[in-house]
Amino acid sequence: MLKTLRLPLLALLFSIMLLGLAVILRFTEDSNEDASIPENATQQTSVVDALPESTVATPITTLVPTLRPVSNVLPPIAGQLTEGLVGNINKLNPLFAGLNPVDQDISSLIFEGLTTTNDFGEVVPDLAERWEVSRDGLEYVFVLRRDVLWHDGLPFTSADVAYTINVIRDASYQGDAALKAFWRTVEMTIIDDYTLRFRLVQPLALFPEMLKMGIVPAHVLEGYPVDQLEHHPFNLDPIGTGPYQVEELYAIDGQLSISLRVAPVYRQRPEGQTGFQIDRILFRTYETTEEALAALVRGEINSLGRLEPSRLTSLNGITNLTVYSRPLPSVGVLIYNWQRDDIPYLSNSRLHLAFAKGINREEAVLKALGGQVILANSPLIPGSWAYDGTARYPTYDVEAARETLSTVSFEIAVETPVPSPDEVIEQQSTETPSETSTESPTVVESPTPQTISLRRNFTILVINEPEYEALADALAQQFSALDFSVEVEAVDEELYFQRLKAGDFDTAIVEYSFAPYADPDPYAFWHSSQAEDGVNYGGVNDARLNELMERGRREHLGGVRAQIYRDFQQVFVERVPALILYYPLYTYVIDSRLDGIKIGFLSTPADRFRHIQDWTWQLSTNS
């Protein structure tokens, strides 16, 4: 009997051994795969591919205390980019993404607007094929492209645009309040599936750029309560028309991260049929800049966006990184309070000119902010189609400044109170008359003007952050050379804005931001109508500047408008109603082996991806 069963038993035993060997080999293989995924990484959707690492040519041990030299790290994976972002992923939905920089960066690759901007900040078609403007500038007709599909394969139509705008102007919309207020003033009509008409209440040249906001799919979201949209699953599983679509979500050390792939439907479009060698993008998020920098040094990420320029010294010694810097669409200025009754000379144009001559802006800016900013000479942003590089502030010259100051009056006429006739009679009746008095009745004379000297001291209001306090201190020291005593008032951000809005300041350092638009319209910052409820905190009121700004925002012909803004900049630097100081910089650090990087005008930092279809890895076989 046993002899009969010997062969079957041996076969069974051999099969068990083979099965055991297979299990062991599979376990070893899985362990090797997991080794390339960060510890504590958990899937949120499907299986995550191994995360790439990059080579660190020169290990740095002094960046942050937790860093240690890294060796034997893997080179970047061809066709894949891993980028680090500081912050959290919340809502990858353009209806809400503008409230969070991380969401804005990622969603900019998933969604598109009817328009976009080019490297010079000019508005160009995107989902729109073209548009036409009426002669009075009040009506815009947009014709949409017919070759665009959503990532799920359904066609993009006028209904999607109408749905997106109707959500934004809905009373229960929880997103950008300013955007909601604007769109509630615009009349919209669907002409057909690929044509819409917009009617404005007044001409607005920047209107086409208002339509660069990402459009969302009506077929996915329609019917859902608007006040509940911020909780819709779509916010973390979005469907767009952009070049990249969501591949998967995953968590690493409690931080939500995401991978995107080039969308197959986008590759069918003419602009998607070439390029896009970066087929996959992994966005890894970090709570702090220190953690993101450490990840960059370790090779966990290939690039890092929104890095403060002051942190660049931490990367000294790393040879495989390239730094790209571009001005952000913001300008830092010292504004004067033109409405300050107790210091009326702050609105004097001669004083403004004297200060422009007598303050060495370059020295103050470099001393306080170093390489974090660049010196500004215009209230508009360099790189823009409207920027005039010939607009220059007066040359720094203290003696010329003193000469100009000698033409400014620092005295004010006041009238000495004079008693009324009744008061004079009453006063005389109380006096003892002289028996021999032959004096004539008292005559009441006109008041005699008198002058009093105004104080030559004022304050600079600033947010209590070290670099801005340092800038204010540097300016205060220079004002002393012009015989002014200036003190710095550094307060927290909340109080700072309260005082700006209330006009409770003498002078203040302010950053005026054009974001999220590339359009150069400076109306909100400098037009006199914006002093009450806008951001013209100092109450600037210059008739010539007002007239140019009014014309500029109405004129929709690009060439004419460009000339208007050139004139505006020339008048601004001649009359210097405020002291223009600096442009803050956006700094992007990326692996030097990534080629094809081109960063033009930034309306938001997400514009750095404008030419991502041209990015390629230049990897040698032994990288």
Image (cartoon, helix red, strand yellow):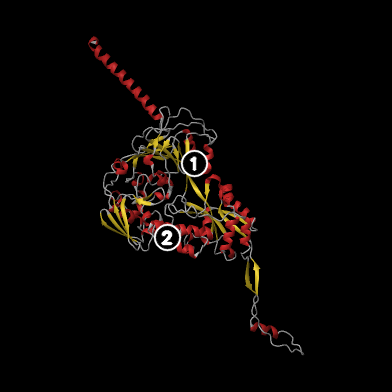
Report the side of 343 relative to 263 (left or right): right
Give percent across and percent down for residue 507: 57, 58
Task: Check disc 1 and give the amino acid type.
Answer: Thr
Give percent across and percent down for residue 119: 41, 47
The residue carrying pointer 2 sits among few (fewer than 14), some (14 to 19) or many (20 or more) residues within 10 Å by Cα, namely: many
Which quadrant of the figure contains the N terminus? top left
Q: Which residue is mark 2?
A: 552
Give percent across and percent down for residue 401: 61, 58
Q: Which residue is mark 1?
A: 289
User: Can residue 577 be spotted in the picture?
Assistant: no
Q: Nearer the viewer, residue 320 or 185?
A: 320
Closer to the N terminus: mark 1 or mark 2?
Answer: 1
In space, the residues marked 1 and 2 are separated at their CA atoms by: 40 Å
Which quadrant of the figure contains the C terminus? top left
Q: Compared with residue 77, is residue 352 higher up or lower down, i.e. above or below?
A: below
Report the side of 187 relative to 431 (left or right): left
Q: Looking at the rendered structure, which numbered label has been put on residue 40?
A: none
Q: Compared with residue 500, is residue 290 higher up or lower down, i.e. above or below?
A: above
Task: Check disc 2 and give the amino acid type.
Answer: Gly
Give percent across and percent down for residue 427: 69, 83
Nearer to us: label 1 or label 2: 2
- Residue farthest to the right, as pictured: 436
- Residue farthest to the top, as pictured: 3
Element class at badge 2: helix
Q: Nearer the viewer, residue 54 or 549?
A: 549
Which residue is at 30% across, 19% downward? 16
Q: Are marks 1 and 2 in contact (CB under 8 Å)?
A: no
- Residue farthest to the front, as pictured: 390
Q: Nearer the viewer, residue 573 or 40?
A: 573
User: Can residue 10 be spotted in the picture?
Assistant: yes
Element class at badge 1: helix
